[in-house]
Amino acid sequence: MKRKAEIRVAQIGYQFMGRAHANAWRQAGRFFELPVRPVLQVVCGRNGGAAEEAAERLGFAEHSSAWQEVVARPDIDVVDICTPGDSHREIALAAAAAGKAILCEKPLANTLAEAEEMLAGVRARDLLDMVCHNYRRAPAVLLAKRLIDEGRLGRIHHFRGTYLQDWIVDPAFPRVWRLERARAGSGALGDIASHSIDLARFLVGEIREVSGLLETFVAERPLEGGGRGPVDVDDAALALLRFESGAVGTVEGSRFAPGRKNYNRFEINGSRGSLAFDLERMNELELYEESGPESGFRTILATDPSHPFVDAWWPPGHVLGYEHTFIHTVVDFVRAFAAGERVRPDFEDGVRNQRVLDAIERSSARRAWQPA
Ligand code: SOE
């Protein structure tokens, strides 16, 4: 059998997102016909010993504690950024300068200025770039996209995005990096509301202006090294949205919703119907179409092989999971890489998302509507 060309991946980071991305690079070619074969070449981390253990566990050929050297290597094709947001800019600019394709975790950066620098960096070299807003590639979300684009809901009036978790409701939970502005850039706003904003842009369109409200419920937490320290990020982020299309929306991201574990839900209302998606029931799409007295919401199980990506997996009803959204993201990235085409969401999408995040922060501080 003719040996396939390869796409060699350097992954920076190996914690939660690093594990999800490594699994995606490893599984993509095992379930999908890909034009080139992903090779998990090297995983990088600040701690050499931990990087070595991660390489063994995640299936990378090598490990390194010097990402700067790795991204410049001629044998590396892709740099996959799975680190906290405070290092996205420097890694992406170095990877772009070395002419690499880049997959970057969301949000693109910790500030709008950094995001714009990253976009300029990749566009200057006409590189392949993608932001890992993985939920776009859940088959039920793609079904929602198709139904909207086919006009089945008519004119869209409402987008209602809710992303709720509960992992830091306990004040005794330590101030991890996601709770530090210097590391994460923001709290629930950039970490989870950014997903709702990406889905709003993907399904309804561009956002023109916002009215935001950020709140921090627990202002001080135990530090992991002992002592206590201030929390300088939002615990909850809410916003009213006006879309360029004339639709209106709400986004609510909170980590203080006991019982909600990864409750990423949206509902979209149009002139002829509504649809709703809930990540905790991610194979289903709720659809309501006006059809007389018997109208009612029905649940579509998006596991038929006719839905995007599904035919590579299992027969109808053999449901998919969170990790499949990352595998589908990598599949489209690899196909775009081989074809020399662009793939979305790209860094331009990342900057547009960051503009909305920035506007929500400005609006909350000024208690006034702000343009996105
Ligand atoms: C933590 O809130 C987190 O891991 C986010 O960082 C991810 O983007 C989200 O998909 C799941 O929850």
Image: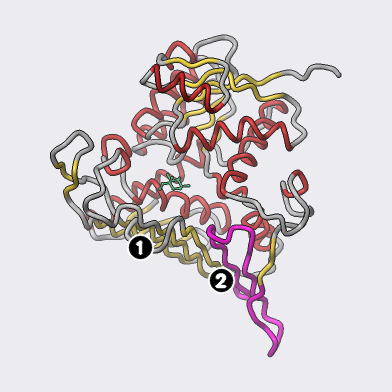
Residue type pointed to by label 1: Ala
- Give the residue displayed 51% in from the left and 42% down from the top: 349
Return the residue at label 2. Answer: 269
Q: What label does residue 300 carry, if any? A: none
Residue 341, given in percent of the width and then of the height, sits at 68, 31
Q: Is residue 66 above or below residue 112?
A: above
**Count of marks, rendered view:** 2
- Give the residue displayed 33% in from the left and 55% down from the top: 370
Quick check: is 71 in the magenta stretch?
A: no
Residue type pointed to by label 2: Asn
Q: Is residue 156 above or below residue 342?
A: below
Judge the density around disc 1: few (<14), some (14-19), many (≥20) Cα neighbours within 10 Å. Answer: some
Return the residue at label 1. Answer: 257
- Give the residue displayed 32% in from the left and 47% down from the top: 187
**Cβ at disc 2 under 8 Å from ligand 1:** no
**Cβ at disc 1 under 8 Å from ligand 1:** no
* Magenta residues, start to end: 269-298
Judge the density around disc 2: few (<14), some (14-19), many (≥20) Cα neighbours within 10 Å. Answer: some
Near-viewer residue (311 or 203) = 311
Near-viewer residue (247 or 256) = 256
Residue 137, given in percent of the width and then of the height, sits at 62, 48
Distance from Cα at disc 1 to Cα at disc 2: 24 Å
Which one is earlier in the sequence, the residue at label 1 or at label 2? 1
